[in-house]
Image (cartoon, grey):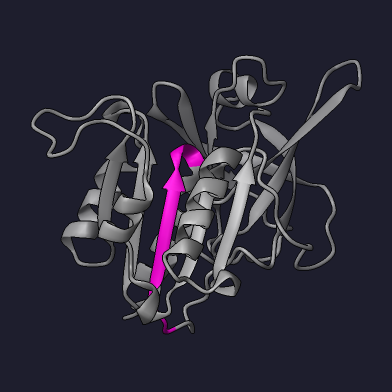
Amino acid sequence: MSGALGGPPAGPVRWVPATVTAAWMETPGSRSLLLDAPELAPALAGQHVDIRLTAPDGYTAQRSYSLASPAGAEQLQVTVDRMPDGEVSPYLVDGLEVGDSIEVRGPIGGWFVWRPEQTEPVQLLAGGSGVVPMMSMIRTHAASGSTAPLRLLYSVRTPAGRFYTEELDRLAADGVVDLQYVFTRETPPEWPRQAGRLTPALVMEFGIVAADAPSVYVCGPTPFVESVADALVRLGHDPSRVRTERFGASG
């Protein structure tokens, strides 16, 4: 996910080198990068890092990317959507190679995080690449052995646009996460619902009810986040328990 807006940094923030140790395509337009940045402090689930690129003439461009790796991971994973007009994402998706070095700083963010000591139910609602920080939460939940109920409602345009498909399906089959997809433009064959946006009715049908007092995390493009957050409040969720993170079209 790009363009993440987080809270205050967890500690001193400075640019440090990071080496790309692995890279693979998640979808035709997105790529996951595994980064070794030993000078960074351990991250919490839901935090993000800034990535800076410097051209030979000294020009720099930077963007924020949520972490998909579990809390405390020795190597950090980011998943980047290619933005056609972006300054950073096209290079991260199409140009960066394993062994290359880039600059990073972080981890950043103290509000949109989940910690294993939380025991209340957890409702995750993701739009598109907004699933990236939620993957960090799901992986942390699995690694910690947490018994807190965990549910992901994932809105995505097409089946081919899903991130982490095989891993999410496996974690759902193992009972780590209750997983439900909403496809907005194209559905898989024999899908039980027509393609369409995530509506308040679907949030009510598939979400954890307000009476169970879940912690709720919503991440995605600004219109998605605003629509879903409004629906949650109308459905009775305590606004103070609804945490949001939104991003724009910058690459």
Residue nearer the viewer, 65 or 38: 65
State yes or no: residue 42 in magenta: no
Asked whether the viewer can see residue 205, the reply is yes
Q: In this view, does 48 lie to the left or right of 159?
A: right
Q: In this view, does 101 lie to the left or right of 125?
A: right
Residue nearer the viewer, 248 or 109: 248
Q: Give the range drawn in magenta.
A: 119-129
**Residue drawn where x is 45% and y is 38% of the image:** 128
Residue nearer the viewer, 146 or 70: 146
Percent position of residue 29, x then y:
45, 22
* Quadrant of image for the N terminus: top right
Q: Above or below — where is 140 with respect to 83?
A: below
Q: Above or below — where is 243 with respect to 60?
A: below
**Residue drawn where x is 22% and y is 29% of the image:** 187
State yes or no: residue 126 in magenta: yes
Percent position of residue 200, x then y:
38, 52
Residue nearer the viewer, 14 or 236: 236
* Quadrant of image for the C terminus: top right
Q: Above or below — where is 203 with respect to 188?
A: below
Percent position of residue 234, x then y:
47, 62
**Residue drawn where x is 47% and y is 78% of the image:** 116
**Residue drawn where x is 66% and y is 46% of the image:** 4
Percent position of residue 201, x then y:
31, 52
**Which quadrant of the view contains residue 54?**
top right
**Which quadrant of the view contains residue 205?**
bottom left
Q: In this view, does 31 lie to the left or right of 143?
A: right
Q: Above or below — where is 161 with respect to 146?
A: above
Which residue lies most toward the right here? 58
Which residue lies most toward the left here? 190
**Which quadrant of the view contains residue 158?**
top left
